[in-house]
Amino acid sequence: MAWLEYLLPLIFLFPLGAMAVIVIALRNLHDARVRSPFNSRPLREPGQALRDRLDQAFATLFLNGALGPILTLAPLVYGMGRMLFASRQNWIEWALYGALSTILVLIYCFLLIRDFQHIRRIKLGLACEMAVGQELERMVRPEAHPYYVFHDVPTDGDIIDHIAITPHGVFVVETRARTRPFTADGREINLVTVEPERLRFPGWSEHAPLVKTLRASRWLASWLEQRCGQPVPVMGVLALPGWDISCAGTPEGLMVVSGETLSQQLSERRLGELSDELHDAVITALVERAAELDSNPSLNVAPSI
């Protein structure tokens, strides 16, 4: 029976299939997320959403790196089995098996390159968020000053990187990581010009970070007013770690900083005065909002980088 010549070589694919099943079962072996021993809620650090994305990116890299050799060998192994069971040799068929393996090699090389670039971008974003988060932590001195800092607070369909509460206002802090270009002689260019509607980087411009930060600050101001029953002074802050800022005009309700002395800048910025009652109400509302991210996984959307 001619169909047995195509069916019997599948026996040689069983070991490869077993290895593939093991790889898929172990794809989530690396999971750095930990839960509190007190209330079993996930513990969150600055940039936790990016840490979760980094774990997923490493899982994808592991999957592509381990499955790639298995799948690229599969056509060759099947072809070797066909050569053993075939009644006559068909060199066109063998060439097709080789061509299929070559195509699979190219595809998985592309996927691995993509994964490495994706991980690199996430690491850069995480490094910037951690740097800004550490700078904000300097504000937290509970015994002397009524400061409070939240990380990764969910909005309606997005995530705010940081929210800092001072006695003189609430600050929505968004962090953006951008790779700094070099000149032909190897000199780094790290100057960004802030205009009313865009950020002018060396060689390109963006307006999305300004729009996103303003949208987040307006959402928070509206949401806090509904929860607290009175207006709360809120300002958006866009941090670009590693860049020198040149302001040619900043949108109203927004400040753009490098983040190096962010805690001092926010401590000195006066948006208004928060009474003790309003201050406590804002903190209570944000604590409840941050807890929703742990109880409702649908709010855990990917942050912008």
Image (cartoon, helix red, strand yellow):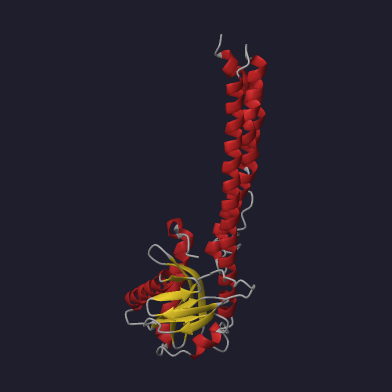
The residue positioned farthest toward the front in the image shown: 184
Give above or below for 88 relative to 58.
Answer: above
- Residue 27 visible, this angle: no
Percent across and percent down for residue 185 are 64, 73
Q: 108 or 96: nearer the eye?
A: 96
Residue 40 image-quadrant placement: bottom right
Which part of the image, by quadrant, shows the N terminus?
top right
Residue in view at x 41 percent, y 69 percent: 208
Q: 17 or 294: nearer the eye?
A: 17
Percent across and percent down for residue 276 are 43, 87
Residue in view at x 58 percent, y 38 percent: 104
Q: 52 or 225: nearer the eye?
A: 52
Residue in view at x 46 percent, y 89 percent: 269
Residue in view at x 51 percent, y 83 percent: 147
Percent across and percent down for residue 74 are 62, 31
Residue 7 image-quadrant placement: top right
